[in-house]
Amino acid sequence: EVQLVESGGGLVQPGGSLILSCSASGFLFSNYPMSWVRQAPGRGLEFVAGISRDSVMTYYADSVKGRFTIFRDNSKSTSYLQMSSLRTEDTAVYHCLKGVGNYLTLAVDYWGQGTLVTVSS
Amino acid sequence: NFMLSQPHSVAESPGKTVTISCTRSSGSIASNYVQWHQQRPGSSPTTVIYEDNQRPSGVPDRFSGSLDYSSKSASLTISGLKTEDEADYYCQSYGVFGGGTRLTVL
């Protein structure tokens, strides 16, 4: 059974930093791309970032480019989202997603439960 | 960049079939795979269709996905509607999500 467990969310001040982690199990982690999607309270879904299985290719939404970094450690079956220069509009539940196939197409098939990030003073 | 447009809401009776559309604003609908995600009230999203027409393990075959190249749209069809299908449905292609469609089963 595919399981994705996010951690690292919390309350942070504007301009601050945070690192989210996603621990994966139930599949061969190193074979698949991974992604992060967020959902602000009462709003729709927004694709944040994606990374290929070998970390060679990455994708970032324009809204986070230059502030967020996605990376992964295949030896630990874990993906990460490093967030800096956080803004109030970054407040959201952040979900980790398992990708599909060999390439970074941003096709996804499993979601984690998410971790809440609140940016407020 | 392109946008994905979905109807705000649809409603249908239990046992019936419903189709939700997702129209791409520019470029071919086949340029990037289309996924469909279900979000029940108070729950995290789950994927019901990936890569246009594939179902993740555990998703019933009442859910199906298709593309219409002429109208640049993707469709999610749910047959034999159940009350448990009541949810928001989002299409997604590459890094773009549609605005979501609220399905009411009444």
Image (spheres, coloured by chain):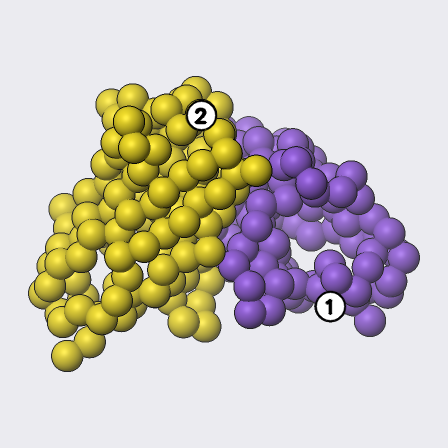
Residue extending furthest toward the bottom = A121
Q: Colour of chain B?
A: purple
Tell me, yes or no, if residue A7 can be seen here: yes
* Chain for numbered disc 1: B
Mark 1, residue position: B104
Residue A36 tag number: none
> Does residue A93 appear to the left or right of B104 in the view shown?
left
Question: Which of the two discs, 1 and 2, sits closer to the camera?
Answer: 2
Q: CA distance from mark 1 to mark 2?
A: 37 Å
Residue A28 tag number: 2
Q: Amino acid at mark 2?
A: Leu
x and y, in percent, of residue B4 in the image: 51, 49
The residue drawn where x is 44% and y is 68% is A43
Q: Secondary structure at mark 1?
A: strand
Q: Are the two marked residues, 1 and 2, in contact with CB atoms closer than 8 angstroms?
A: no
**Quarter of the image that includes the N terminus of chain A:** top right
Q: Is residue B82 above or below residue B63?
A: below
x and y, in percent, of residue B58 in the image: 69, 40
User: Quick one: label 1, few (<14), some, or many (20+) residues within 10 Å?
Assistant: some
The residue drawn where x is 71% and y is 64% is B86
Q: Colour of chain A?
A: yellow
**Quarter of the image that includes the C terminus of chain A:** bottom left
Q: Amino acid at mark 1?
A: Thr
Seen from the viewer's position, the closer of residues A40 and A1 is A1
Q: Is residue A66 above or below residue A105?
A: below
Q: Secondary structure at mark 2?
A: loop
